[in-house]
Image: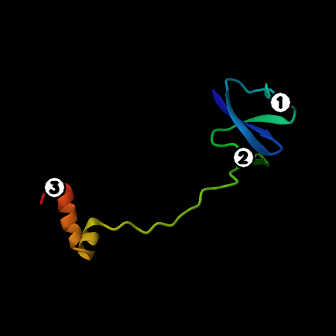
Amino acid sequence: MNKYAIVKDGVVINVIEYEEQPSTPPSGFEAGHVAIQTDKVSTGWIYANGQFTDPNPPEVVEMPAPKSLTDIILADPTELVKLKQALGIL
């Protein structure tokens, strides 16, 4: 089975699996709908110039570099006590 985006007026309105390339318009849809094979789209995506675009791309959030356990303990020695308690070695 292949996934197909059902597109009307440049917007993905549905994503359906078909065994074969569906007709245009796909069965059950009115004129103006087309089925385009794709794997990674969702309803609401835009289709233009042969490309799908997510209108709401995920926001990239910068994360600070993780600290090593040694750095955490050196910055606050009470963290060593908490770690030993969590491991049940106190």
Q: Nearer the viewer, residue 21 or 5?
A: 5
Residue 44, disc: 2
- Asked whether, in this view, residue 24 is left or right of residue 80, the answer is right
Element assignment for label 2: loop
Element assignment for label 1: loop
Q: The residue under label 2 is which amino acid type?
A: Gly
Q: Are marks 1 and 2 in contact (CB under 8 Å)?
A: no
> Where's the C terminus, which quadrant?
bottom left
Say which of marks 3 and 2 sits in front.
3
Residue 33, disc: none
Q: Earlier in the sequence, mark 1 or mark 2?
A: 1
Q: The residue under label 3 is which amino acid type?
A: Gly
Vertical side of 25 occupied by 52: above or below: below
- Report which residue position mark 1 lands on: 25
- Asked whether, in this view, residue 16 is left or right of residue 78, the answer is right
- Report which residue position mark 3 lands on: 88
Percent x, y of residue 24: 83, 30
Q: Earlier in the sequence, mark 3 or mark 2?
A: 2
Element assignment for label 3: loop
